[in-house]
């Protein structure tokens, strides 16, 4: 049985990173627009980078939520779930079991998206329609644009597709599953001390030298 205290600790950290990435995106996107949306703008580049980071952290948050609900460990939940599926079938774990496990996790994340849109819609000014494929699209953002350097990063088609079809769902999901956990004060004492230390180091580094 996994120790779920580590799940909640990581959920707190991922949610805080997710929130900071979104706030940074808003900041740099606003500067990019005010400056006339100039081609090659550094603020425009940073805005896109922070948006991708936001989506990637959101995916990790949702996967952690699935791990908690399915009672899986933090590390490699797909492999753990695959072994469980194989055991229930009295089979030796194989590639097909991992594919089934990955699909089950994505289906669960898809449900998270649908539930978030349903729960948040009454509080929003405009009507939101859930588009299927949210979980797969979110995973691709995390894999292709954030985690692994691939040639897909040079194109914008898939990224644009995510923004057009799944941004509203992602934002609702962020509000439902991430905001509650995105509080620096709720970090464990050790993590709080590490953050304070890093902040002090950055402050010293940025302070003008005499």
Image (tube, grey):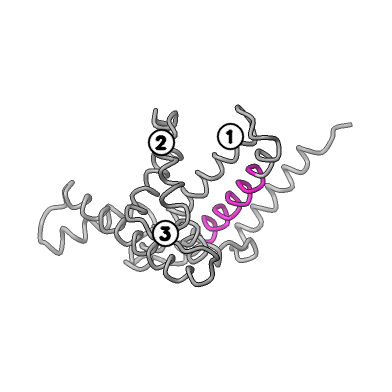
C-alpha span from label 3 to label 2: 24 Å
Badge 3 or badge 1: first in the primary sequence: 1
Picture coordinates of residue 72, whole percent (x, y): 33, 62
Residue position marked by numbered label 2 in the rendering: 157
Q: Does 122 sit left or right of 194 as displayed?
A: left
What residue is drawn where x is 10% and y is 61%?
A: 90
Q: Is residue 110 above or below residue 141?
A: below
Is 28 a magenta residue? yes
What residue is drawn where x is 46% and y is 46%?
A: 163
Q: Nearer the viewer, mark 3 or mark 2?
A: 2
Magenta stretch mostly in which secondary structure? helix
Q: Quadrant of the N terminus?
A: bottom left
| Disc 3 and disc 2 in contact, CB within 8 angstroms | no
Residue position marked by numbered label 3 in the rendering: 62
User: Is 108 or 127 nearer to us in this picture?
Assistant: 127
Residue 45, label in figure: 1
């Amino acid at each position: 049985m996994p120790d779920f205290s580590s799940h909640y600790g990581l959920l707190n950290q991922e949610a805080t990173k997710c929130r900071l990435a979104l706030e940074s995106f808003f900041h740099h996107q606003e500067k990019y627009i005010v400056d006339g949306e100039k081609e090659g703008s550094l603020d425009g580049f940073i805005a896109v980078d922070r948006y991708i980071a936001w989506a990637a952290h959101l995916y990790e948050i949702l996967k952690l939520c699935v791990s908690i609900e399915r009672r899986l460990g933090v590390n490699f939940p797909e492999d753990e779930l695959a072994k469980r599926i194989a055991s229930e079938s009295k089979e030796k774990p194989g590639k097909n079991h991992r594919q089934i496990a990955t699909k089950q996790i994505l289906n669960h994340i898809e449900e998270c998206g649908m539930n978030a849109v349903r729960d948040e819609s009454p509080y929003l000014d405009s009507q939101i329609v859930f588009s299927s494929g949210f979980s797969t699209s979110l995973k691709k953002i995390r894999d292709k644009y954030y985690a692994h350097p691939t040639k897909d990063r040079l194109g914008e088609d898939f990224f644009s597709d995510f923004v057009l079809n799944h941004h509203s769902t992602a934002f609702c999901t962020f509000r439902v599953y991430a905001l509650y956990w995105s509080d620096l004060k709720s970090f464990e004492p050790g993590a709080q001390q590490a953050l304070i230390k890093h902040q002090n180091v950055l402050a010293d580094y940025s302070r003008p030298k005499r």
